[in-house]
Image (cartoon, rainbow, N blue to C red):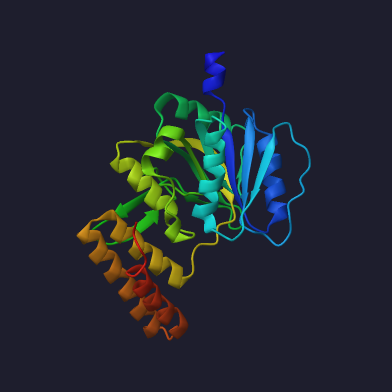
Amino acid sequence: MMAEIEKNWAACVVYYQDFDSLTNLLNSLESQTHKPNEVFIADNNSNRSLTLDSFSFPVNIYRLDENKGFAGGANVAIRNAIDKKYSNLMLLSQDVLLSPDSAQKMIELLTIIGGIVFPTMWDRNKNIIFSKGGKVNKFLGSIKLSANNVPTKPDWADGSCLVFDKKTYESTGGLFENYFMYFEDVDFCLKAKKLGFTLSHVDTKVSQTPKGPNSRLRSRNSVLLARRSKSWLLKISVTKRNILGAFLNLAKFRLTDSRQRLIGIKEGWSVPIE
């Protein structure tokens, strides 16, 4: 009985105005060899209220009064799951689809080693792998995912599918909401790693339709991440990398992108880091 309790888990989903994707995700969870015991959905103030079919697991919907972004929605879903005594948590974006054995493999590893567990991420649009974990290079200011090999001692993993336990989440203080969306996963993983938690890859495929941030948001949030890291080397290298990117866009006559990157840099240095 205790082993079964330890393997109980909750799916924590961030949702915003894509009902078809959410339905596909819930059907994917229904098809798991190890289904969630409960699903917690944070609805970021979508235009219409959610009405869902019945599933073999309870589905809880928390409609927010405003769009709090991915980080804010994630915190709402996760904290409600923790309030219901769940210790094993899977954070999911609404457009994710899991292989039938994904949850079983990731939850099993989580119950053994704790920390953060992540899968191989597959881009359904391009039919290619886009993530097996990521690294942060303080000298070059690069914050990149690896599509080919699992990095040695990965620094972060894509936040559209992360599995972690209550202890890891509460130790980090949750996802930092000033990002709104993008780079909050990097921040969360870096903080967990700094606290001594491990990041572990599981050889199972989870697919998504990634879009990525625009020029302004990429610059803003990468600078914000560097500032929160408290590393002056990373602050300098990330800022330089973004300035270089702005000038390269200018040289290619991509004036709007160049201007947006410069605005993002300024905003990244202005956003509160606590």
Task: Name the spot of residue 103 as percent of width and height, x first.
Answer: 57, 33
Tell me, yes or no, if residue 246 can be seen here: yes
From this view, report whether residue 251 is shown above or below residue 267. below
Picture quadrant of residue 10: top right
Task: Name the spot of residue 32 as percent of width and height, x first.
Answer: 65, 32
Tell me, yes or no, if residue 155 can be seen here: no
Q: Looking at the image, which residue is at 39% across and 44% down?
A: 173
Position of 57 with respect to 70 (left or right) is right
Of 182 and 242, nearer the camera is: 182
Residue reaching furthest to the top:
1
Task: Name the spot of residue 221 as percent of width and height, x first.
Answer: 40, 63
- Count of numbered labels shown in the rendering: 0
Q: Looking at the image, which residue is at 74% across and 59% down?
A: 48
Position of 14 with respect to 190 (left or right) is right
Task: Name the spot of residue 241 as percent of width and height, x first.
Answer: 30, 69
Position of 128 with respect to 165 (left or right) is right
From this view, report whether residue 16 is shown above or below residue 1. below
Quarter of the rendering occupied by the N terminus: top right
Residue reaching furthest to the left:
232
From this view, report whether residue 150 is shown above or below residue 3. below
Of 147 and 240, nearer the camera is: 240
Quarter of the rendering occupied by the C terminus: bottom left
